[in-house]
């Protein structure tokens, strides 16, 4: 068994495009949950409308790719308004239930027979994203190989765009949260009645937060779909939202760069564990009750769960979180 | 103490009976009703509050004091009735509108924003902040100067409330009494014309009560009007210019402290409620510790 090889593979994945779009999802959740206290369990729904927005615009409507990206982001604004209007006045737990249900409705709708002419149903959408890859300024023609990293020229471009976007969005969110606008979001997280009593229109600010975090989530969906020039309906399962939550918590809720680092670390741990489990299974090192296709699939999650538990026990505020803030009762 | 305020002096000639008109009312309540199921929590036919005075709202437990507060500040919806602040109709206004119009409340259970610093708690109260708009928030140059002015005002208030050395602490790290002080100071950041304090002294240690009393009277001396709910009769008798007594949702008496203390209807309301509660735990008028014979 080769531990180094497994870790290298984990590192490769954690730098790759997937971790980058996860980071965007987690940054959006940080706006919702970390700063405003909105328990959004349907972040994957925003990712979905971002991805389908691009895919449908380009493949069905024949629009240019950049228009598709704008459509995807606007679709997230629409989803936030639609979702928020009836639910933001509800208590936090009802809001959580509604968001997870809405995301599932969107996924099942996209995959259904009725919408097949538009969404491609279970087959999803393939489209031409060459306009995006033509922008690639990287000088080398072949693959980038450096240490354990090895990415094709296109992959390198996607991951560069993805992580740069995540960094820029993190900086923008950090600046917003230091402003009086962000102060109102944080006060809503603490006690929305107190914010009301001081003359703040809580509903309006919750809506703005839902839109901002949702659009950031849709950016994740855009990066996801551009990377493969496809939309695969099976991607948008509820697990995605909960991975993004795990990343947010690992990195540090309400921290500035926690979601980015959390996405990197979580994906590294999960992918290393997966590589390790595959190796162990191939070498017949796993006991019978852990081998077999389904059991091997579960093992990495057990390992990842263990790492998360240790982290929460010894560093409950996450990697970049504020322990003093964490210790106070919300 | 009560006689020092000119506005209070204007109350001298007012006939102490429920629903009486005042010479210069800041708040005027007309027929406000609220019932929960079969229980009528609030049924105020007419009530006026004189500008520039400290008006105490007292009554036995369950008299509807907090419900009335919630209705007037928009946190609850009445079944009927109307009320106005400075002549402006407030019926059906959302809580944040009420606050923006100058009527700011505090809560019985203090709502310090725990994971915001003390200074951030204060700054939140300032109204008309340019940086509270999403797009402007992204351009610090557009709001930094205003923020600096608000910070100076906040620090002056914190200094007055003895909280200045806590400015960078989280509000959740303050003691219960300090949170009450912070909540009051924060309400002043809104620059209200009418401050509604729901049990400002509850759970505050006796040493701090004196300082809180001083702060409440200084609000009046600066020209603000204050309505407060309080159970401690010593406090009520000491600082109020006028007392309104609620029982079972109705105004059963109002008048200057010395008048209300002797009103038979008030004494009956308090003693009656004491019997209902079988040796009740918090009926204040008859609580020997807080002021035998006050009610």
Image (cartoon, rainbow, N blue to C red):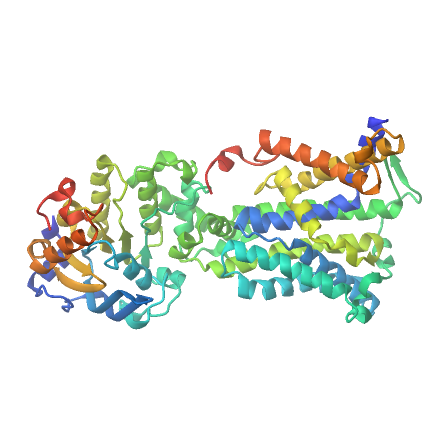
Residue B283 screen position, x and y as percent: 19, 49
Residue that extends furthest to the front in the rendered view of this protein: A288
Q: Position of residue A286 (x, y in %)?
A: 82, 30
**Relative height, residue A72 to residue B141 (above, below):** below
**Residue nearer the viewer, B86 or A127:** A127
Tell me, yes or no, if residue A236 can be seen here. Answer: yes
Residue A100 relative to residue B247: left or right: right
Instruction: Answer with left or right where residue B253 lies relative to residue A11.
Output: left
Q: Say which of A102 and B22 sits in front.
A: A102
State the image coordinates of residue A80 (x, y, percent, origin top left). 61, 62
User: Vertical placement of A321 versus B275: above or below?
Assistant: above
Q: Residue at x 17, y 59 (%)?
A: B244
Task: State the residue at coordinates (70%, 56%).
Answer: A47
Residue in the foreground of this view, choosing between B141 and A178: A178
Q: Quadrant of residue A316?
A: top right
Q: Is residue A314 left or right of residue A184?
A: right
| Residue at x-position 59% and y-position 53% | A40
| Quarter residue A319 falls in | top right
Among the 4 quarters of the image, the one containing residue B51: bottom left
Residue A11 shows in the view = no
Q: Is residue A140 left or right of residue A108?
A: right
The tally of labels here is 0
| Residue A74 in picture, x, y percent from top left | 67, 64
Examine the rendered structure and indicate whether residue A113 appears above or below residue B162: below
């Amino acid at each position: 068994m080769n531990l180094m090889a497994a870790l290298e593979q984990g590192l490769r994945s954690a730098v790759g495009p997937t971790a980058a779009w996860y980071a965007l999802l987690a940054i959006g959740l940080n706006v919702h949950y970390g700063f405003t206290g909105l328990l959004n369990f349907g972040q994957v729904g925003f990712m979905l409308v971002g991805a389908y927005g691009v895919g449908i615009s380009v493949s069905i409507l024949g629009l240019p790719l950049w228009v598709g990206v704008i459509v995807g982001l606007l679709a997230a604004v629409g989803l936030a308004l639609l979702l928020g209007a009836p639910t933001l006045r509800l208590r936090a737990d009802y809001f959580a239930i509604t968001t997870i249900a809405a995301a599932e409705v969107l996924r099942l709708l996209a995959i259904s027979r009725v919408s097949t002419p538009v969404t491609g149903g279970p087959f999803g959408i393939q489209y031409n994203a060459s306009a995006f890859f033509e922008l690639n300024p990287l000088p080398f023609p072949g693959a980038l190989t450096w240490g354990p990293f090895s990415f094709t020229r296109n992959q390198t471009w996607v991951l560069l765009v993805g992580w740069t976007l995540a960094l820029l969005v993190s900086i923008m969110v950090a600046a917003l949260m230091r402003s009086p606008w962000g102060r109102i979001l944080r006060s809503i997280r603490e006690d929305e009645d107190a914010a009301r009593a001081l003359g703040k229109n809580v509903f309006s600010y919750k809506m703005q937060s839902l839109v901002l975090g949702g659009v950031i989530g849709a950016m994740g969906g855009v990066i996801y779909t551009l990377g493969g020039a496809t939309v695969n309906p099976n991607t948008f399962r509820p697990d995605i939202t909960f991975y993004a939550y795990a990343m947010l918590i690992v990195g540090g809720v309400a921290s500035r760069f926690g979601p980015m680092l959390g996405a990197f670390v979580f994906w590294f741990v999960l992918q290393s564990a997966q590589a390790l489990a595959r190796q162990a299974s191939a070498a017949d090192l796993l006991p019978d009750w852990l081998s077999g296709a389904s059991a091997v699939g579960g093992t990495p999650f057990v390992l990842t769960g263990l790492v998360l538990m240790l982290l929460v026990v010894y560093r409950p505020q996450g990697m970049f979180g504020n322990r003093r803030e964490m210790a106070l009762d919300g | 103490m009560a006689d020092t305020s000119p506005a209070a002096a204007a109350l001298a000639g007012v006939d102490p009976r429920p629903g009486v008109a005042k010479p210069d009312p800041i708040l005027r309540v007309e027929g406000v009703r609220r019932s929960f199921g079969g229980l009528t929590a609030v049924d105020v036919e007419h009530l006026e509050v004189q500008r520039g005075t400290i008006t105490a709202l007292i009554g036995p437990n369950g008299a509807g004091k907090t419900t009335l507060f919630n209705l007037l500040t928009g946190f609850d919806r009445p079944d009927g009735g109307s009320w106005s602040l400075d002549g402006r109709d407030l019926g059906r206004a959302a809580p944040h509108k009420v606050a923006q119009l100058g009527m700011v409340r505090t809560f019985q259970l203090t709502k310090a924003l725990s994971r915001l610093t003390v200074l951030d708690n204060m700054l939140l109260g300032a109204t008309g902040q340019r940086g509270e708009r999403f797009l402007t928030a992204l351009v610090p140059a557009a709001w930094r100067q205003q923020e600096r002015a608000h910070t100076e005002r906040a620090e002056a208030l914190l200094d007055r409330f003895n909280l200045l050395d806590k400015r960078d602490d989280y509000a959740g790290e303050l003691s219960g009494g300090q949170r009450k002080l912070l909540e009051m100071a924060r309400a002043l950041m809104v620059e209200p014309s009418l401050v509604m304090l729901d049990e400002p002294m509850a759970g505050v240690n006796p040493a701090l009560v004196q300082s809180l009393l001083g702060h409440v009277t200084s609000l009046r001396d600066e020209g603000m009007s204050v309505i407060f709910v309080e159970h401690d009769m010593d406090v009520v008798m000491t600082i109020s210019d006028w007392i309104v007594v609620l029982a079972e949702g109705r105004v059963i008496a109002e008048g200057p402290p010395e008048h209300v203390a002797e009103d038979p209807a008030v004494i009956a309301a308090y003693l009656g409620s004491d019997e209902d509660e079988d040796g009740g735990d918090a009926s204040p008028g008859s609580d020997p510790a807080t002021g035998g014979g006050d009610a």
